[in-house]
Image: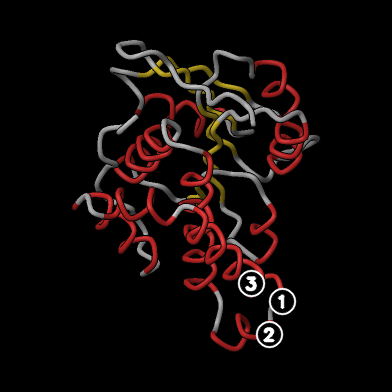
Amino acid sequence: MTEQKSSPPGEESEVLVVDDEPRLAGLFASWLTAGWSVSTAYSGDEALEKIDESTDIVLLDRRMPGQSGDDVLSTLRSKDDDTRVLMITAVEPDFDIIEMGFDDYLVKPVSKDELLTALTDVLERAAYESSVQEYYALVSKRALLEKEKTEHELGESTVYQELTDRIEEVAAETDQAIANFESHTDFAAAFRDIESGSDEVSGSLPDNPN
């Protein structure tokens, strides 16, 4: 298992904003002021050149000329790079997201509050064990699909059934850790929001018990 990357307490988190539209990348970067150290990249190739061990999280567009956001994400995960990835894209989620190794997924247009909430939540989750991170990511994907797909489409999808089965497996493997976290009011509220398919996940995780 790879070591989880996160900035030491008191240091700014390193954020890379990747979008082939410079004005949009600049807008997202302008929303991240105090507490963030922000850089931008306007292509997948440039993103891969800039991502290193100091990068805490990448805000990643999917549709880009040359190397797409999907390609960038696949390259990172193939190298066991555990940099957190928040997809921000105009691409509506489809069943292909189940196999993608992102931490969260926002559909454009995105508000400042929505971006900051998702970014903060992903970075806070990075402090927890990998099984809890996986559980949160899987439940988020299920919520995205349940928002976009009909009951018939979900029922006909083998990969969706595999996703729900995996959620149950991870929950069983980490039931005590998840039970401890869900006992925290804010964490429980966040999961209620995710599982109901809400647009924004509010609240934050409890302090790291480790």
* In-front residue for pair 134/88: 134
Residue holding disc 3: 160
Q: Nearer the viewer, residue 62 or 6?
A: 6
Q: Residues within 10 Å of mark 3 (few under 14, many from 20)?
A: many
Amino acid type shown at disc 1: Thr
Where 155 falls versus 57 (above or below)? Answer: below
Q: Position of residue 20 (x, y in %)?
A: 64, 33
User: Closest to the observer: 208 or 47?
Assistant: 208
Q: CA distance from mark 1 to mark 2?
A: 7 Å
What residue type is disc 2 on? Glu
Q: Is residue 198 left or right of residue 155?
A: left
Q: Contact, CB < 8 Å: mark 3 with mark 1?
A: yes
Q: Amino acid at mark 3?
A: Tyr
Residue 21 place in picture, x, y as percent: 59, 34
Disc 2 target residue: 156
Q: Position of residue 12 (x, y in %)?
A: 37, 14
> Outermost residue, right direction?
66
User: Are circles 1 and 2 on residues that touch, CB within 8 Å?
Assistant: no
What's the residue at 47%, 37% (across, down)? 129
Determine whether, in the image, residue 157 is placed left or right of residue 164: right
Q: Which residue is mark 1?
A: 158
Picture disc at residue 84: none
Q: Do tag 3 and tag 2 residues touch (Cβ < 8 Å)?
A: no
